[in-house]
Image (spheres, coloured by chain):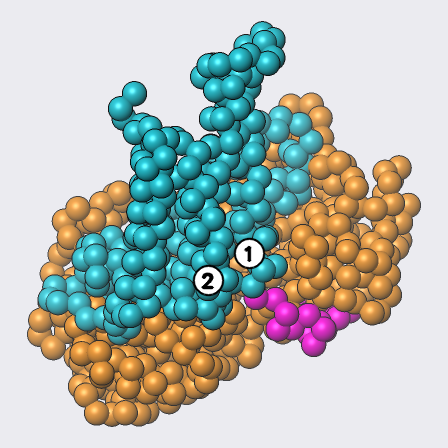
């Protein structure tokens, strides 16, 4: 679990629910078509909006590294194995690089970036507690479910500690030299036992504080929507609309379900 | 502060509870009447049903799916299960009491569940944190609190709900002396200011004896002793001590060990210990660990004691400096224990982890003891002989076929020590071996360690148990300032 970073920009202060909705809008608009134009327009506009996210550059690079890495890898796969059309440049075993696969590969790289970057950037500044507040109060998800998940999330860090200790303990018991796979399975089972125990202790602690008591629950932290939420959501709708419009206008829009 | 709290009366009427998965009743035929505002220390051997009674009083035992109930537990005449919020419970494990990521939110959680209006919640949160003396900003991450602070946080969370009855289940068992003092002071202030009824379960009676006005001792068939602290400790002292309770004036007397220094086994030079790449603690002293001696590392929770122990045990590599096994210990292996193979550790350094459950590998006590000797490649009859001997020596024979995870806290501890002894290591590293143990387990462990020292083994322990130190330690190394606070 990585903690939310302290963000200072106008986007960082928006409600987590808005951030969730904004990245969903972009993702939906961009997976509808597999063309070059919509992805590049969206990505260009997003890069222009990036400075408003309030995430320091260093943090940005580090946290988005996985996206920068995943995009070319996905592209490479499409390049080598994607649908063939036009001139074929390389044909070797299953690998076939053609005009079609080159174009598709570039479009895919841009698309992964255009969906992945805003999602990572928006979620960098999401605090799990604030998200839970928003999901329960604004989206009206059941409090029992949201708060249970939130409290459980805190245990992930504890489980990680448990895992490392289990590893050391196996070395101390003299069984860590061989049978890596079997040991992993045994260790996973031990972690499961500990997890169930910790989970039920947590449930007791929550019930002891009146969790699940009959009657209306109140919320200590109000989750509200404001001007910057409207701006963020409108911004993401605009980017999505611009991308789709540009693609349709240039005739490159190819509705994915239409094939 | 007193505003809004009305002390509750707790009554058990021929009450009993049997967990759905058990054949025996955890509590049976219990009659108890605690008037509003009284402060009660609840004692009894492990398995007498103390925790079950607290859960029952808090209304947390659940319905017919969870078990079978007889009689009733009442709060102000109302069954406890339908009096949510009237009783607040703090449990033993500080880690288990924390629910949310930020201090203020965690304290507010109970109020939210009870439907307290938003404006009032934050006033209550401030009041409750003040009452337990936890003076940190509301947005402090709960993961950064020490054990004592976590227990006070849990208490604040309970207090903010304004319960008429406060239930504490061994709240200080897992804490260092500083944490114990913090929690005790917080409880004293809490009952003083709110006048709430208090029921506390704790083996360490000396912590609470002055604070309570009644001691109740539970036995297998209900209350066995009941009265003012001095009277109960006077009359029942011996019986209580035999049942595992730490009673003032009935503490185990163990003469200090005579150090008989044997061969040097391990040398430590300018060690920096840490997990991963993050340094936790630096030891400036040069230390040598010799056979027949006990070296103890002391210091507050979070000072990095466990990390030092795991490093000396050859489980974590030193980040800087050296931990060298001398020829008598290395016995042909490389000088750095951290580079030994797992099997090479067995006959050289045994480790007993703070939480025994981390090191259990099998589903039977006897199998658990056989793991080490088998890994050493001993013939089956030799393995069986060692298992037999250890079961006998640690009083586990009757549990040979039991699942290690189902043992009591004291039994788990004895088993984890036994697994380390099974391969007869020259050196034993023990992380808080007496943590939360009752007096019987404590005494049996100290006597066992004493025998090991006499046999020439070296002990390296991490502990904050003063009695343990005076009974065993040849040398004490105080850890603190360097790593303190840097560990989250």
Task: Give the magenta range.
Answer: B469-488
Image-based side of B46 in relation to A71, left or right = left
Q: Residues within 10 Å of mark 1 (few under 14, many from 20)?
A: some
Tell which residue pokes out farthest to the left in this image: B77
**x and y percent of residue A210 in the render?**
22, 66
Residue B379, x across and y down, in percent: 69, 23
Q: Earlier in the sequence, mark 2 or mark 1?
A: 2
Examine the rendering and report whether any part of residue B43 can be seen: no
Q: Which chain is orange?
A: B
The color chain A is rendered in: cyan
* Quadrant in which residue B109 is drawn: bottom left
The disc at residue B265 is none
Q: Secondary structure at mark 2?
A: helix
Residue pointed to by mark 2: A53
Q: Which residue is mark 1?
A: A60
> Residue drawn at (49%, 65%), measured in percent from left and top?
A54
């Amino acid at each position: 679990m990585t903690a939310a970073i302290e963000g200072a920009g106008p986007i960082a202060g928006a409600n987590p629910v808005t951030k969730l909705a904004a990245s969903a809008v972009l993702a939906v608009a961009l997976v509808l078509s597999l063309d070059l134009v919509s992805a590049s327009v969206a990505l260009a506009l997003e890069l222009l909006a990036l400075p408003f996210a309030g995430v320091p550059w260093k943090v940005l690079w580090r946290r988005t590294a996985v996206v920068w890495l995943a995009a070319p890898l996905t592209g490479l796969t499409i390049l080598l194995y994607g649908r063939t059309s036009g001139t074929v440049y390389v044909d070797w075993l299953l690998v076939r690089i053609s005009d079609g696969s080159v174009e598709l590969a570039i479009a895919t790289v841009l698309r992964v970036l255009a969906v992945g970057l805003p999602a990572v950037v928006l979620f960098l500044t999401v605090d799990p507690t604030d998200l839970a507040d928003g999901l329960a109060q604004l989206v009206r998800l059941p409090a029992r479910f949201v708060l249970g998940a939130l409290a459980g999330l805190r245990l992930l860090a504890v489980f990680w500690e448990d895992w490392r200790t289990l590893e050391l303990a196996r070395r101390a018991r003299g069984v860590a030299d061989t049978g890596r796979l079997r040991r992993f399975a045994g260790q996973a089972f031990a972690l499961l036992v500990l997890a169930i125990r910790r989970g039920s202790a947590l449930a007791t602690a929550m019930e002891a504080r009146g969790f699940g008591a009959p009657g209306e629950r109140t919320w200590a932290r109000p989750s509200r929507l404001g001007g910057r939420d409207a701006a963020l959501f409108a911004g993401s709708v605009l980017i999505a609309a611009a991308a789709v419009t540009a693609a349709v206008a240039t005739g490159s829009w190819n509705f994915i379900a239409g094939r | 502060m007193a505003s809004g709290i009305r002390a509750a009366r707790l009554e058990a009427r021929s009450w009993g509870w049997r967990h759905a998965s058990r054949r025996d009743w955890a509590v049976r035929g219990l009659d108890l009447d605690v008037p509003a505002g009284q402060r009660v220390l609840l004692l009894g051997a492990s398995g007498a049903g103390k925790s079950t009674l607290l859960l029952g009083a808090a209304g947390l035992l659940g319905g017919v799916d969870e078990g079978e109930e007889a009689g009733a537990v009442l709060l102000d005449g109302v069954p406890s299960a339908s009096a949510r919020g009237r009783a607040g419970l703090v449990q033993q494990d500080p880690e288990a009491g924390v629910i949310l990521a930020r201090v203020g939110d965690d304290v507010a959680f109970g109020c939210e569940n009870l439907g307290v209006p938003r404006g009032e919640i934050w006033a209550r949160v401030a009041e409750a944190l003040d009452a337990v003396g936890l003076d940190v900003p509301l947005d402090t991450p709960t993961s950064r609190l020490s054990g004592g602070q976590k227990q006070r946080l849990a208490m604040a969370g309970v207090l903010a709900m304004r319960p008429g009855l406060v239930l504490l289940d061994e709240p200080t068992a897992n804490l260092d002396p500083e944490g114990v003092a913090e929690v005790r002071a917080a409880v004293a202030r809490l009952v003083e200011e709110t006048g709430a009824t208090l029921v506390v379960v704790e083996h360490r009676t000396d912590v609470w004896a002055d604070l309570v006005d009644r001691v109740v001792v539970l036995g297998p068939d209900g209350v066995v002793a009941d009265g003012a602290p001095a009277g109960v400790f006077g009359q029942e002292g011996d019986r209580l001590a035999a049942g595992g309770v730490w009673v003032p004036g009935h503490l185990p007397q163990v003469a200090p060990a005579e150090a008989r220094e044997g061969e040097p086994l391990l040398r430590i030079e300018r060690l920096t210990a840490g997990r991963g790449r993050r340094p936790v603690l630096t030891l400036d002293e040069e230390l040598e660990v010799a056979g027949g001696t006990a070296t103890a590392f002391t210091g507050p929770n979070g000072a990095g004691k466990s990390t030092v122990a795991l490093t000396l045990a050859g489980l974590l590599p030193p980040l800087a400096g050296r931990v060298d096994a001398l020829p008598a210990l290395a016995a042909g292996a490389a000088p750095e224990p951290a580079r030994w193979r797992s099997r090479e550790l067995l006959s050289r350094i045994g480790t007993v982890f703070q939480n025994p459950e981390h090191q259990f590998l099998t589903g039977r006590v006897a199998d658990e003891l056989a793991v080490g000797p088998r890994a050493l490649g001993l013939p089956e009859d030799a393995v069986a002989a060692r298992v037999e001997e250890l079961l006998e020596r640690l009083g586990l024979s009757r549990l040979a076929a039991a699942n290690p995870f189902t043992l009591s806290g004291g039994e788990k501890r004895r088993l984890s020590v036994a697994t380390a002894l099974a391969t007869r290591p020259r050196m034993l590293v023990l992380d808080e071996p007496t943590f939360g143990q009752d007096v019987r387990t404590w005494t049996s462990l100290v006597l066992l360690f004493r025998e090991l020292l006499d046999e020439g083994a070296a002990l390296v322990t991490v502990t904050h148990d003063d009695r343990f130190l005076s009974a065993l330690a040849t040398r004490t190394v105080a850890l603190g300032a360097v790593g303190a606070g840097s560990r989250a």
